[in-house]
Amino acid sequence: MLSKFLYVGCVLTASLSAAQSVPPVVVPQAGVSAQSFDMSQVSLSNSRWSDNQGRTLNYLKFVDVERLLYNFRANHKLSVKGATPNGGWDAPDFPFRTHAQGHYLTAWVHCYATLRDSLCRDRATYFVAELAKCQANNAAAGFNTGYLSGFPESEFSALEARTLSNGNVPYYAVHKTMAGLLDAWRIMGDTKARDVVLGMAGWVDGRTEKLSTTQMQQMLGTEFGGMNDVLANIYQLTGDKRWLTVAQRFDHAAVFDPLAANQDRVNGLHANTQVPKWIGAAREYQATGNQRYLDIARNAWAITVNAHSYAIGGNSQAEHFHAPNAIAQYLTNDTAEQCNTYNMLKLTRELWTMDPSTANYFDFYERALINHLLGAQNPADSHGHITYFTPLNPSGHRGIGPAWGGGTWSTDYNSFWCCQGTALETNTKLMDSIYFYDSSTLWVNLFTPSILNWSQRGVTVTQTTSFPLNDTTTLRVTGSGDWAMRIRIPAWTTGAEIKINGQEAEGVEIKSGTYAQLSRAWKSGDTVTVKLPMKLRAVPANDNPNVAAVAYGPVVLSGNYGSSMLSAVPSLALDSLRRTSTSSLSFTATANGKAVNLGPFYEANGFNYNVYWATSGSNKTGGFKKAENSQKAEGTGLPCGCVSAWSSSLVYH
Ligand SMILES: *[C@@H]1O[C@H](CO)[C@@H](O)[C@H](O)[C@H]1NC(C)=O
Ligand SMILES: *[C@@H]1O[C@H](CO)[C@@H](O)[C@H](O)[C@H]1NC(C)=O
Ligand SMILES: *[C@@H]1O[C@H](CO)[C@@H](O)[C@H](O)[C@H]1NC(C)=O
Ligand SMILES: *[C@@H]1O[C@H](CO)[C@@H](O)[C@H](O)[C@H]1NC(C)=O
C-alpha cells in the first residue's frame, strides 16, 4: 500500500501544478491486501472498451460547463453568466438538481488521470474553482458555512423535520458533489477541491450533530447516497477522527442490522438507495477494522448477486428489490437500473481487494460489466448516451420508451438521470480493475486489451485479445524480476490452458473459479497465452428452472426479433442452438418453432431482442444438456459450439 502512494506522490508531482499534490492515505486500510494501480498506469488499447471510453470523452469535452454551473450559481446568488438552464433532472425546478455534476467532475478527473488530457484537467479545475465561489457566497445567500448545492438549504430542514414533500433526496445529491470533489483532490491533487469538500463535510457535521440518534435514523429513511463512504474516505485522507464520527452517523440500522445477521430483508427496498451504503460499510471496515462492517458488506453482496440479480448481472425491477430469487416473475421493461450495477461493481472491487484469492468477485464483475454496462451505451452515438434501465421483457429494446424509462437513450441536456451520471464514470474507468498488485504479485482480473505500466517494478505488461469474441488472451512482459502473475480462471470455463513462451506452464494448477499462479523470474519478452474455452450454458432463473438465459462463455446471448413483438417468453429448443460463424459470436436456434438469430446481448441494438427463454428439449432440472455425440456446427466446420458444448455446471445460481 505504502509503495503505491509513494509512487503517486513522487512520480506525478512533475506534471502537477503548485495547487496540486496527491494526498496519501494516512489511516491504514484494515484488511486490504491487493492494491489498485493509479489510473495513469493502465491504458486501454483499441476495442469496444476504448470505443465506449472515446464516446463518453467526446461528450465530456463537448458539454457546456456553464450550463452545468447554472443551478449552483443561481442557488448561491451568483450570476449565471447568461447560461441556458438544463432540462430533465437538472432543470431549475427539479427537486434534486445538481445531483449529476459530481459525476461529470469525477469523469473529467478520470480522463486526466488516464490520458493526461489537459482539456479534461482544465474543465475539472475550473469547475472546482467555480463551486468554491458558490460556497464562498453562502452568507449572502443565507446558507450555513460550507453548504454547496443547486437547491436551498431549507430542503435539509424539511428533511430533518420529515416534512419534505417534493420527492427530494438532498443528501443523495450532496453526496455526489462531495464524491466528485474528493476525486479531484485524491486523484488529481486539487487542493481547492480538498478545501471545498472539507467545508461541506464540516457543514454535514454541523447539521447532523444536533440530531438525536432517533432523528438521525428516521432521516436515513430518505435516500442519502454514500455519505458514510465519502466521509470515511475523508477520514482516511486526513486522519481526523471527526470525519469518521460523522460517517458513522449515516450507518442505517434498519438496513445494516439484518445484513450483519446475514438476513435477506431487502424485498421492497429501493435498490440503488442501498448499494452505496454497503460500499460505505466496506470503507468503514477499512477505516476501523470493525468486522461487523465487513460482514454487512459481504452479506449484502452475496444476497444481491445470488438472490436478486438477472443473468446480465443487473438487479432490481422498477428500481426495487423483490422477494429473494424472484427473477422470471419480473421480466419487464424497467429491469436492471444501470446505477445499481455501477455501485455493485464498486462494492465488488472493494471486497475483492480484501479477499483477493476469491475469484468469484471478478467473475461477477466481468459478467455485469460485459452483459449490462458495456451494452447500456449507444455505440451509434458519438456522445455515448446510455439507457437508464436495461429492459429484459420479451422483445425488449434499447432506444425507445417513455420520458425516462425503458431503454430510452439519454440526451446532451434534457435527461441528467442518475444513470447518465454513473455511466460517465463507468465509461471513463474501464481500465481501473483489469490489474491489481502487491509486493510480489500481479493479478490479472479482466481480459481487456490494455497496457499496464507497473513502474514500481519497471515492468510493462501488454495484454492483447479480442475477448470475449476470442477465448484467448496474450500477456507480454517487458522488464524482469521475480514475482507471481495470478490469472483469474473464470468459473464458466473448463479446460483452460496457460502457455509461457509457447510451452505449457509446468506445475501450475489451473482450476476454474480460482487463480492460476505463475511464479517466475520474468525476462523481457516473456509471453503468457491464456486460453479460456467457452461453451454454451444456460443461466436459469432462480425461481423457475424452465426459464433461462443462454450464455456463451461470459457472454449472455439474445435473440434478434427485428421489429416483431413477443407477447410472452418464447420457447427455445436448447438442442437447436448452433454457432454460425468462426469470427463472431453468431448463433442460430429454433424458438417458438421458427429460426431466430442470436448474438451477444451487449451488441443488441436497433432491434427487439429476447434474453430469457422458456427452455424446452433440455434438462428441466438443471437447464443444461450434455451431448452424446460430437457434431460439427452446421456450415462452419467448427468443433461443435452447440449441443456438445452445453456446460455441465451452472455458474451463477
Ligand atoms: C413498459 O411496460 C409498461 C407496462 O407493461 C407499459 O405501460 C409501457 O408502455 C412499456 N414501455 C415501453 C417503452 O415499452
Ligand atoms: C511508466 O511510468 C513511468 C513513471 O511515470 C515513466 O517514467 C515510464 O516512462 C513509463 N513507461 C512506459 C513504458 O510508458
Ligand atoms: C483467437 O486468438 C488466437 C490468438 O491470437 C488466434 O490464434 C486464433 O486464431 C483466434 N481465433 C479466432 C476464431 O479468431
Ligand atoms: C438432469 O441433470 C441432473 C444433474 O446433472 C441429473 O442428475 C439428471 O439425471 C438429469 N435429468 C435428465 C432428465 O437428464
Image (cartoon, helix red, strand yellow):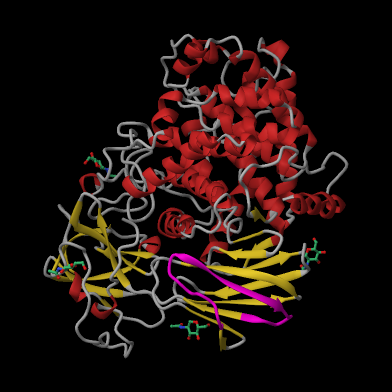
623 up-or-down from 221: above or below? below
Q: Quadrant of residue 642?
A: bottom left
Quadrant in which the C terminus is drawn: bottom left
92 up-or-down from 292: above or below? above
User: Which residue appears at 62% of the width and 22% of the height?
Assistant: 246
Number of numbered discs on residues: 0
Task: Please give the range of residues in magenta.
Answer: 505-527
Q: Is residue 74 visible?
A: yes
Task: Give the side of residue 580 with respect to residue 374, left or right.
Answer: left
Question: Where residue 232 sits in the image (x, y, percent)?
Answer: 63, 32
User: Which residue appears at 58% of the width and 69% of the height?
Assistant: 449
Near-viewer residue (26 or 381): 26
374 up-or-down from 128: above or below? below
Q: Quadrant of residue 222?
A: top left
Question: Where residue 524 sits in the image (x, y, percent)?
Answer: 74, 80
Magenta-colored stretch includes residue 516: yes
User: Which residue appears at 48% of the width and 8% of the height?
Assistant: 161
Near-viewer residue (436 or 403): 436
Outermost residue toward the bottom?
637
